[in-house]
């Protein structure tokens, strides 16, 4: 699985980390000079979340920006009492009903 958001397709980007020396001009120096350039990666902040997709609950790898902007709809939380009540209210199969 690639490091990519499944909604906005944000992925790893490459760039550089610059190393400087010297004192900035506004502080009285002659300016900052670049003394080195190292390759680095900018990785998106991906999270595995449960989301509702086309009415079904799926696990997705989504960036936090999509989560904050409301592009991900999370499933409704259910308490233990709700799960117990739903199981108790389930219809009884006809074969079991005649034995009782």
Image (cartoon, rainbow, N blue to C red):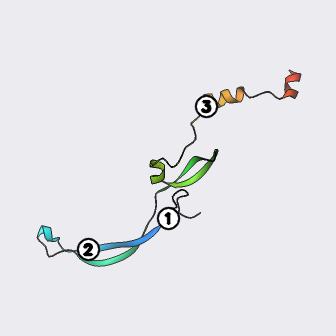
Residue at left offset 13%, top offset 73%: 29
Q: Nearer the viewer, mark 1 or mark 2?
A: 1
Considering the image in quadrants, where does the C terminus appear?
top right
Q: Residue at x 26, y 74 (%)?
A: 20
- Report which residue position mark 3 lands on: 80
Upstream in the sequence, badge 1 or badge 2?
A: 1
On screen, residue 45 above or below 100: below
Which comes before the other along the chain, label 3 or label 2?
Answer: 2
Mark 3 is surrounded, within 10 Å at the Cα level, by few (under 14), some (14 to 19) or many (20 or more) other residues, namely few
Give the number of the disc on residue 11: 1
- The percent position of residue 24, horizontal first and vertical second, equals 17, 70
**Which image quadrant is residue 79 in?**
top right
Q: Is residue 16 left or right of residue 90?
A: left
Please tell me in which quadrant of the rendered image residue 73 appears. top right
Quadrant of res 40: bottom left
Instruction: Looking at the picture, tell me which residue is in the foreground, 58 or 72.
Output: 72
> Tag 1's secondary structure?
loop
Q: Which mark is residue 20?
A: 2
Whether tag 1 and tag 2 are in contact, CB under 8 A, the answer is: no
């Amino acid at each position: 699985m690639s490091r990519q958001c499944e909604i906005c397709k944000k992925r790893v980007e490459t760039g550089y980390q610059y190393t400087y020396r010297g004192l900035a001009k506004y502080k009285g120096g002659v300016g900052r000079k670049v003394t080195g350039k190292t390759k680095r990666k900018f990785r998106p902040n991906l999270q595995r979340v449960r989301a509702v997709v086309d009415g079904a609950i799926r696990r997705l790898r989504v960036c936090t920006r999509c989560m904050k902007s409301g592009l991900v709809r999370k499933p409704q939380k259910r308490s233990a009492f709700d799960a117990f009540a739903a199981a108790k209210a389930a219809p009884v199969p006809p074969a079991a009903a005649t034995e009782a």
